[in-house]
Image (cartoon, rainbow, N blue to C red):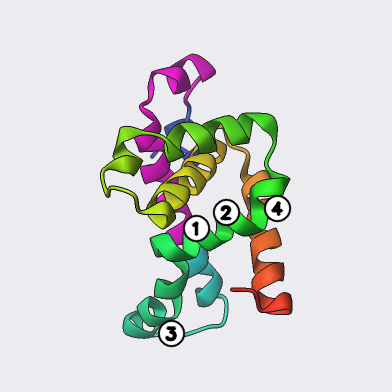
Amino acid sequence: MKGFDEIINLQLADLREIPIENFSYIGDAVIGLIYKVKLLKDGRIKTKDLYEKTKDFLSAKAHSKFVDIVLDHLTPIEMQYYKRAENSNGAKKRGNDNDYRKSTGFEAVIGYLFLTKSYSRIEELLGVIDNCIYTEKTY
């Protein structure tokens, strides 16, 4: 079986060919996986409990709040991906749902970082969010 990095071996030219909505789709999956795995670190947990404990972190409303926390921390290229996704037709399909548009932008940033193998940057951004949620209780 191929190694993980070999499976995710896209070149920058390939990234330019990917529709922005697909970055959001990948980012949403990555965020979900990360938060689910974090809960597994505590030991045995039932699937139902795993779902219940992560669902509040995986909604459009939650991801919109994540944007409020990390927006000032985004690099210029991350901001480009955020804006492209936030203003995309896919994000606008829900009409004027600002939470959905913001969450689509955030997910695109995470998707971009994942596909460029910037795993430490994902960890950094989610760390900012976690610190804010668990210490300042702004969530």
Q: Which mark is residue 124?
A: 4
Mark 2, residues whose alpha carbon is within 10 Å: few (<14), some, or many (≥20)?
A: many
Question: Residue at (44%, 40%) from the top-left corner?
Answer: 86
Q: In which image quadrant can residue 75 be found?
A: top right
Q: Amino acid at mark 1?
A: Ser
Q: CA distance from mark 3 to mark 1?
A: 27 Å
Q: CA distance from mark 4 to mark 1?
A: 18 Å
Q: Which mark is residue 67?
A: 2
Question: Residue at (66%, 79%) from the top-left corner?
Answer: 137
Question: Residue at (39%, 73%) from the top-left corner?
Answer: 55
Of the numbered discs 3 and 4, the one sitting upstream in the chain is 3
Q: In which image quadrant can residue 139 be found?
A: bottom right
Q: Which mark is residue 45?
A: 3
Tell me the mark number nearer the camera, choosing from 3 and 2: 2
Q: CA distance from mark 1 to mark 2?
A: 5 Å
Q: Amino acid at mark 3?
A: Ile
Location of residue 119 in the rendering, given as x and y in whole percent from the top left corner? 62, 45
Location of residue 60 in the rendering, given as x and y in whole percent from the top left corner? 40, 60
Q: Which residues make up the magenta segment?
A: 10-33
Q: In the image, is 130 to the left or to the right of 15?
A: right
Looking at the rendered image, the quarter that the N terminus falls into is top left
Q: Which mark is residue 64?
A: 1
The relative height of residue 126 versus residue 133 in the rendered view (above or below) is above
